[in-house]
Amino acid sequence: MKNQRLAMWLFGGLFAFLCIMNSYYVVMQTKQAVVFQFREVVRVVSNPGLHFKIPFFQSVEFFESRVLAVDAPSQEIMTAEQKPLEVDAFARYRITDPLLFFQRLRIESIARDRLGSLLNASLRSVLGTVKMAALLSSERVAIMAKIKEQLNAEAKDFGIEIVDVRIRRTDLPQKTSEAVFARMRSQREQEAAQIRATGQQEAVQITSEADRQATVIVAEAQGKAEKLKGEGDRKALEIMADATNRDPQFFSFWRSLSAYREGLKSENTTYVLSPDSEFFRYFNSSTANK
């Protein structure tokens, strides 16, 4: 009998301990809780601290109150110009309605998968209407805000608020990058060829103009030289004619001396002439006096 009473006291003490331990729960500052009774919602607790519940009949589910992240896998998206882009984006969200979140998604892993799919769909929907240049300009902020707005409209049915959406990276696919690089190189080569051709054409024009001017200058100089030479020859002839008219005998003598000077330059010059030749007439004084 005594042993039975002791066992009852032990059982009662253990039951009381379990009731006490199961009658409270602690909500951390980074958490929020939903209290259920037989899977029916009793209350939602968002205030941190110690709280109480009916032991064994009520259960508690905890959810994050901090900002959470979801990363969208890199995907290829066609822009409004029908140009493919490799887009890598992420979103930040917060659970604003833990009860609705639990009813629709239950756990965070499911929420990440679902939000990732929604984020990809929003990216395709919004980026498919914009041009590539807009993503590289100040319009990028407005584009991200539009994606956030569209994603929020779909995520509110899950008790979630989208805090921020960011496009981490936008790159051309590898094949497209190579094609763009090849096209840019081809364009630069064409521009270089056109510039060289233009330069060569201008060089030919400048050279031709310089040759023309040189030809004109040389022709003018030659014409002027011929004119001056003609005037000099004319004046020389006038002087010579005047001198001849003044003293014909002296002029004949001077011409003979010039002929001797030109014809007898070399020491070994030999002439086979008659002594009484007209060429040597001034070597004979008697002849020279005639």
Image: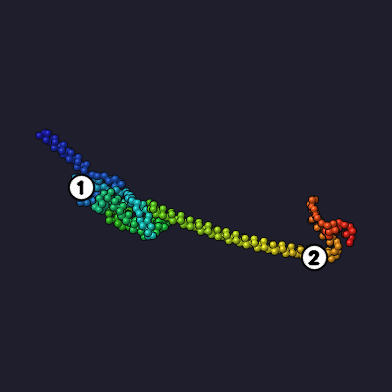
Helix, strand or loop under label 2: helix
Q: Residue at label 2?
A: 238
Instruction: Give the percent coordinates (x, y) of residue 106.
Output: 25, 50
Of 65 and 262, the residue lying toward us: 262
Determine the CA span between mark 2 and mark 1: 146 Å
Left or right: 239 with respect to 43?
right
Q: Does residue 167 appear in the picture of this structure? A: no
Q: Residue at label 1?
A: 58
Please identify, in this view, whether the residue under mark 2 or under mark 1 is nearer the observer: 2
Label 2 amino acid?
A: Glu
Tell me which label, 2 or 1, sits earlier in the chain.
1
For image coordinates 69% across by 62% down, the residue present is 222
Left or right: 227 with respect to 34?
right
Q: Does residue 27 appear in the picture of this structure? A: yes
Way the structure is coloured: rainbow
Instruction: Give the percent coordinates (x, y) of residue 158.
Output: 27, 54
Instruction: Give the percent coordinates (x, y) of residue 90.
Output: 35, 51
Label 1 amino acid?
A: Gln
